[in-house]
C-alpha cells in the first residue's frame, strides 16, 4: 500500500469510485440519488445527490473510522501539525464543546476570556464546568474587546490553581491575537491544558507571516472552522489534538453529541479543502492579504472610516493582528456598524460578514475578485457621502465586564420566571442574549443583569442588530432566576 501524500484525497477517491458502481440502494437516504426528490436533484445536481450517502464499509464510518475517513483525517493532522485531527460535521460549535467536555467535568474550572463564542458557554451549561473569566482589554477608540494580557492570565492561574484548562480565542472575530505561545507555557507549567478557539484562523497554518497557530504554539486542542477561511462547505470543521491528548477519549466525547449520520458532502469537502490548502495555501493567502491590505489603504483614504491593522499591535493585549481581516470602524461617520451592514446589503447588494455597534467585518479570500473589492470601496464612499452624520451620543464600546454570580449550568436549569427585559435589572440571567453574528453573549446564564447591559441591548435593538438567545423571539422578555440579587 502506497504512502499517502498531501496530494491525495482518500475519501474523495472512495466517493468517486462509489459513483461509478451500479449499486442498488436499499439504505438511507430515501431520496435514492435524487430520484425520490426531483426538485432537489435539479436544484443541487445529480452528482451531488449521488454522493449524499450513508456510511457503508467501503466508505468507512465517522464515529469509528478505520479506512478512508481515518486516512483523510490523518492527512489533515499532518497538514496542520497535529497528533490527530477529527472531522466535525456539526460545525465548529461541536469542536469547541468537545474540547471543553474532554477536559472538564462538572465543578471543574476553566479559565477563558468572556468574549468567547456562545458555543463555549453552552458547553459549560451542558457539562457543569465553572468559568473563570479573564476580562479582555478594550480599545477605547474602537470599543472592541482585545486579547488577554499575560499579566491577567497569570493572575487568574495564581488565583485558581485548580483550573483544568484555559481557553483562548486565536484570533478574535476582529483579528486580534493574544500571546498564545507564552500562554501555553504558563498553562503547562501550572498543569493546565490549553484549548484554542481557532474558528477564524485556518489560514494561520498555511499562510506566510501569519500569527502563530495553536498547534505550532504547543496548544493541546484547537477547533478550526475550515469552512470560514479554508474553503470547505459550511458546517464542516476540524478538531485538532496535540501530542499529550488522549485522542481515543476525545473521540468518545465527540460521539456523545455528533451525529451518527455524518454528511459525506461535508466530509469530502474537508478532504478536498485540506489538499488545496496544503498545495496552494501560501499563494491563496498571499492573495488574500494583498486584497485586504489594498482595501484597507483605500478605505482609510476615504476619511471617516478606520480600517485597522497591525498598528494596533502592542505586544500584549494585541500581541498580533490577522491582516486577512478587513475590520472597519464606522462610528466616526455617525453610523453604527449594523447600519452600514444593512445599507451595503439593501442598497448596494454587498453582503458582509457582520456589523455591530461600531464596526463592520468584511471577509476577504482568494476567491474574491478585484471588481468586488472596488465595489465595496465605492459603496462605502457613497454611504459616507449620503448618510454620514454627527456621532455625538453613539454607544462607544462593544464589551461590558460581566458580574458572574452563579454557575451557567445552575442558572440555566434553575427555577425561572419571565420578566419584561427592561424591568429585569438586578436579577440573575437564566438564558442568553447575544447579537448574531458574531454570537458573543451580551448576557449569559448566571450573570447579573445591570442597567449598563440593558442600555446596550436597547441600543443594539434600536440600531437593527439581530438579537438571539432568549425564549422570547421578540427579546421583549427574559428568563431570570426566581430569586433577585
Image: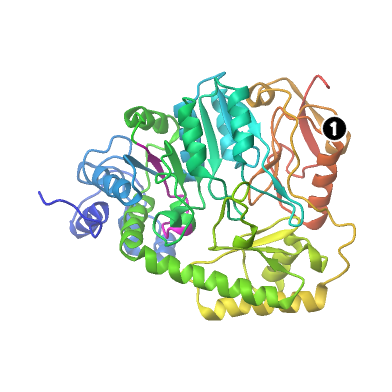
**Which residue is disc 1 drawn over?**
424
Residue 472 appears in which quarter of the rendering?
Answer: top right
Q: Dot 1 surroundings within 10 Å: few (below 14), some, or many (20 or more)?
A: many
Estimate the x, y position of residue 12 in percent, counting from the top left.
Answer: 26, 56
Q: Range of the magenta residues?
A: 229-242
Residue at 67% x, 74% y is 299
Front in this rendered view, residue 332 or 209: 209
Taking 356 as reference, is 85 left or right? left
Taking 313 as reference, is 420 left or right? right
On the question of residue 405 being in view, the answer is yes
Residue at 75% x, 58% y is 358
Estimate the x, y position of residue 116 in percent, counting from the top left.
Answer: 61, 41
Q: Residue furthest left?
A: 1
Taking 48 as reference, is 366 left or right? right
Taking 168 as reference, is 371 above or below it?
A: below
On the question of residue 34 being in view, the answer is no
What colouring method underlies this structural image?
rainbow
Count of residue discs: 1
Residue at 73% x, 43% y is 473
Specify whether residue 182 is painted magenta: no
Amino acid at each position: 500500500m502506497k504512502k499517502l501524500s498531501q496530494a491525495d484525497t482518500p475519501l474523495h477517491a472512495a466517493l468517486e469510485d462509489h459513483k461509478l458502481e451500479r449499486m442498488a440502494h436499499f439504505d438511507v437516504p430515501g431520496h435514492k440519488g435524487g430520484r425520490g426528490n426531483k426538485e432537489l436533484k435539479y436544484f443541487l445536481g445529480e452528482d451531488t445527490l449521488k454522493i449524499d450517502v450513508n456510511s457503508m464499509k467501503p466508505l468507512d464510518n465517522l464515529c469509528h473510522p478505520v479506512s478512508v475517513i481515518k486516512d483523510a483525517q490523518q492527512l489533515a493532522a499532518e497538514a496542520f501539525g497535529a497528533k490527530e485531527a477529527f472531522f466535525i460535521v456539526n460545525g465548529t460549535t461541536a469542536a469547541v464543546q468537545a474540547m471543553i467536555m474532554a477536559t472538564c467535568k462538572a465543578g471543574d474550572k476553566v479559565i477563558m476570556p468572556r468574549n468567547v463564542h456562545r458555543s463555549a458557554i453552552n458547553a459549560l451549561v451542558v457539562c457543569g464546568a465553572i468559568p473563570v473569566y479573564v476580562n479582555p482589554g478594550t480599545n477605547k477608540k474602537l470599543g472592541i474587546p482585545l486579547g488577554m494580557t499575560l499579566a491577567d492570565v497569570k493572575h487568574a492561574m495564581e488565583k485558581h490553581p485548580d483550573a483544568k484548562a484555559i481557553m483562548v480565542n486565536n484570533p478574535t472575530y476582529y483579528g486580534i491575537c493574544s500571546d498564545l505561545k507564552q500562554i501555553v507555557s504558563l498553562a503547562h507549567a501550572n498543569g493546565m491544558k490549553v484549548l484554542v478557539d481557532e474558528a477564524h484562523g485556518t489560514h494561520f497554518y498555511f499562510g506566510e507571516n501569519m500569527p502563530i497557530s495553536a498547534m505550532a504554539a504547543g496548544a493541546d486542542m484547537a477547533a478550526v472552522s475550515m469552512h470560514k477561511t479554508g474553503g470547505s462547505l459550511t458546517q464542516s470543521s476540524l478538531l485538532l489534538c496535540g501530542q499529550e491528548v488522549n485522542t481515543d477519549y476525545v473521540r468518545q466525547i465527540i460521539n456523545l453529541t455528533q451525529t451518527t449520520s455524518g454528511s459525506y458532502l461535508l466530509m469530502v469537502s474537508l478532504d478536498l479543502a485540506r489538499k488545496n490548502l496544503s498545495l496552494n495555501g501560501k499563494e491563496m493567502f498571499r492573495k488574500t492579504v494583498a486584497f485586504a491590505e489594498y482595501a484597507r489603504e483605500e478605505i482609510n483614504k476615504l476619511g471617516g472610516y478606520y480600517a485597522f491593522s497591525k498598528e494596533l499591535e502592542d505586544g500584549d493585549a494585541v500581541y498580533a493582528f490577522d491582516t486577512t481581516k478587513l475590520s472597519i470602524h464606522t462610528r466616526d461617520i455617525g453610523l453604527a456598524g449594523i447600519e452600514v451592514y444593512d445599507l451595503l446589503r439593501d442598497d448596494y447588494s454587498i453582503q458582509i460578514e457582520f456589523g455591530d455597534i461600531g464596526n463592520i467585518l468584511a471577509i476577504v479570500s482568494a476567491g474574491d475578485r478585484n471588481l468586488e473589492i472596488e465595489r465595496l470601496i465605492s459603496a462605502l464612499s457613497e454611504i459616507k457621502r449620503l448618510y454620514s452624520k454627527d456621532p455625538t451620543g453613539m454607544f462607544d464600546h462593544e464589551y461590558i465586564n460581566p458580574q458572574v454570580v452563579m454557575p451557567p449550568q445552575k442558572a440555566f436549569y434553575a427555577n425561572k420566571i419571565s420578566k419584561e427585559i427592561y424591568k429585569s435589572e438586578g436579577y440573575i440571567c437564566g438564558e442568553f442574549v447575544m447579537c448574531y453574528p458574531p454570537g458573543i453573549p451580551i448576557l449569559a446564564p448566571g450573570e447579573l443583569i445591570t442597567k449598563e447591559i440593558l442600555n446596550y441591548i436597547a441600543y443594539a435593538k434600536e440600531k437593527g442588530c439581530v438579537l438571539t438567545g432568549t425564549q422570547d423571539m421578540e427579546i421583549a422578555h427574559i428568563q431570570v432566576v426566581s430569586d433577585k440579587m
